[in-house]
Image (cartoon, rainbow, N blue to C red):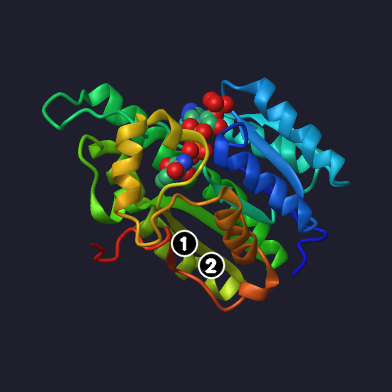
Amino acid sequence: MTLEGKVALVTGGSGGLGRVHGLVLAEHGADVALVYNRSEAKALEVVKEVEEKGRKAMAVKIDLSDETSVQQGVERVHGELGPVDILVNNAAQGIVRAITITDMTKEDWDADIGVNLTGPFLLIKTVFPDMAQKGWGRIINVSSVTGTMGGFGQCSYAATKAGLIGLTKTVALEGARKNITCNAVVLGVFDAGSFYEVAEPFRERIIKRVAMRRSGDPRELSEVIAFLASEESSFVTGEAIEVSGGISLFTF
Ligand SMILES: NC(=O)c1ccc[n+]([C@@H]2O[C@H](COP(=O)([O-])OP(=O)(O)OC[C@H]3O[C@@H](n4cnc5c(N)ncnc54)[C@H](OP(=O)(O)O)[C@@H]3O)[C@@H](O)[C@H]2O)c1
């Protein structure tokens, strides 16, 4: 499996899981644009790590809730690395709000929808024409079992993660005859990023619900993303693939 000659854009490249996606895509041969919003220093560290693997990399600031910022960011990537072949919509906010529906403000709701759902929509809309022209594209949207199972105190986050699955299937249909695939990965819990924002006793309770009784190594996810980004997954589209060690299985 090789991604040589491909340009990948990974949102949340400054975050826990996005860093590993960037590194693994680079290990498979891709050049990588790592998108950050506030954490420039972290994104630049990942750029260095990717370059050490012998691939081209850049950090690009995009506020995913802002259409102009998305368009300008994609233009920068196009100028420095070339047109985007692989889009990984990984960034998210509002992951661990723990606010029940009556206390959730419309401002926070709108902000979460803006980053987690409107952001991927804007990015897909922006990169899709280049992919269609090339006759090749891979779009991977990062969803969560919170979107398929619900999450106490996570109404906005859950709604965005469920929404990404509908977006995935629609883009898959619209891209199918252009050789653009679009799939979602539906995450359980992983040893990186936002899972560590959850208090330890609560993390242990979550892990007891996982059939494999452990959280995932980020690479166990990034390799699935790399497969979905590759030529080898050419007949897989419109899927929502759970990568969770069996968190949604009936376990006891
Ligand atoms: N970790 C887990 O166990 C787990 C479980 C289920 C699902 N997930 C999903 O996996 C993905 C990555 O999660 P993570 O744990 O790695 O999260 P994380 O470490 O908290 O990273 C979140 C990323 O989102 C970016 N971001 C937030 N607001 C943004 C905005 N307005 N514009 C652009 N970027 C923005 C952040 O960039 P800046 O810091 O630069 O602003 C950061 O890079 C998310 O989609 C999350 O829902 C993770």
Residue 188 coordinates in the image, percent (x, y): 40, 52
Which label was assigned to residue 59? none
Front-most of residues 237 and 28: 28
Total numbered circles: 2
Which of the image's four quarters has the N terminus? bottom right
Residue 122 coordinates in the image, percent (x, y): 50, 43
Q: CA distance from mark 2 to mark 1?
A: 6 Å
Q: Residue at x 34, y 41 (%)?
A: 204
Horizontal side, residue 145 vs residue 14: left or right: left
Query: Which residue in the rendered view is the most extreme toward the right?
Result: 54
Mark 2 vs 1: CB contact within 8 A:
yes
**Other residues around mark 1 within 10 Å, as few (<14) / some (14–19) / many (≥20):** many
Residue 50 appears in the picture as rendered = yes
Front-most of residues 3 and 206: 206
Q: Which residue is mark 1?
A: 171
Q: Which amino acid type corresponds to the residue marked 2 in the rendered image? A: Gly
Residue 67 coordinates in the image, percent (x, y): 51, 33
Q: Which amino acid type corresponds to the residue marked 1 in the rendered image? A: Val
Q: Residue at x 42, y 61 (%)?
A: 245
Q: Residue at x 60, y 36 (%)?
A: 71
